[in-house]
Image (cartoon, grey):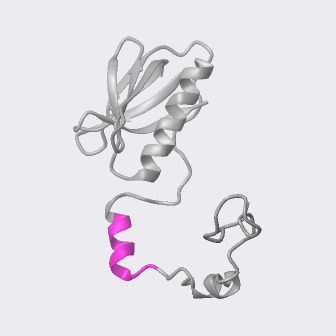
Amino acid sequence: MPRSTTASRPGSAGADRPDATIDIAQAEQATAAPRPLTELEHADLERAGVTGEAPTLSPPGVDAGVTTIAAGGATGTWTSGVKVNALWAQYATRNAYASVANVGWLKIYNGTDAAFLALTTLASQAKQTQTQIAYRTESDGMVHEIYLW
């Protein structure tokens, strides 16, 4: 499919041809290259706890039951060995909930688009496959991390 078509009327000779006034090569050259992060941006990422480290939890055993561990106010509460029963979303920016068995409805963290997309994708996969998950909630009551095996 062409990026743009001419402004001619449907059925006329030039209606299905790409617009010749757009130079794609020039437009692609005008796109700026990614810039490196500044020291301030690196510091913000470190303060937010964003690291490139691997996950720290191990997959649950065959007979794993529901376990809840309160690791302190700063690190949140982990719950493992549960299943996602249902999902709910509304036509609003980053507004979705997951219903966890024997727990209830939990709001998915909505701080960034990337985190929201990753968490809702994991929750929907857990719902569809009925796989046990481990998740972390913070003091705000939202799910900030999900492990799915």
Residue at 33% from the left image edge and 40% from the top image edge:
92
Residue 54, position as x, y percentages in the image = 56, 51
Task: Using the image as rendered, state which of residue 94 and residue 30 is in the foreground.
Answer: 30
Q: Is 21 located above or below residue 77 in the figure?
A: below
Q: Is 20 located above or below residue 78 in the figure?
A: below
**How many numbered marks are there?**
0
Residue 128 picture quarter? top right
Q: In the displayed structure, does residue 126 sit left or right of residue 12?
A: left
- In the picture, the quarter occupied by the C terminus is top right
Which is the main secondary structure of the residues drawn in magenta?
Answer: helix
Residue at 47% from the left image edge and 29% from the top image edge:
134
Residue 1, position as x, y percentages in the image = 73, 60
Residue at 45% from the left image edge and 24% from the top image edge:
80
Residue 116, position as x, y percentages in the image = 42, 44
Task: Using the image as rendered, state which of residue 14 and residue 100 is in the foreground.
Answer: 14
Residue 44 is a magenta residue? yes
Residue 103 picture quarter? top left
Residue at 45% from the left image edge and 18% from the top image edge:
86
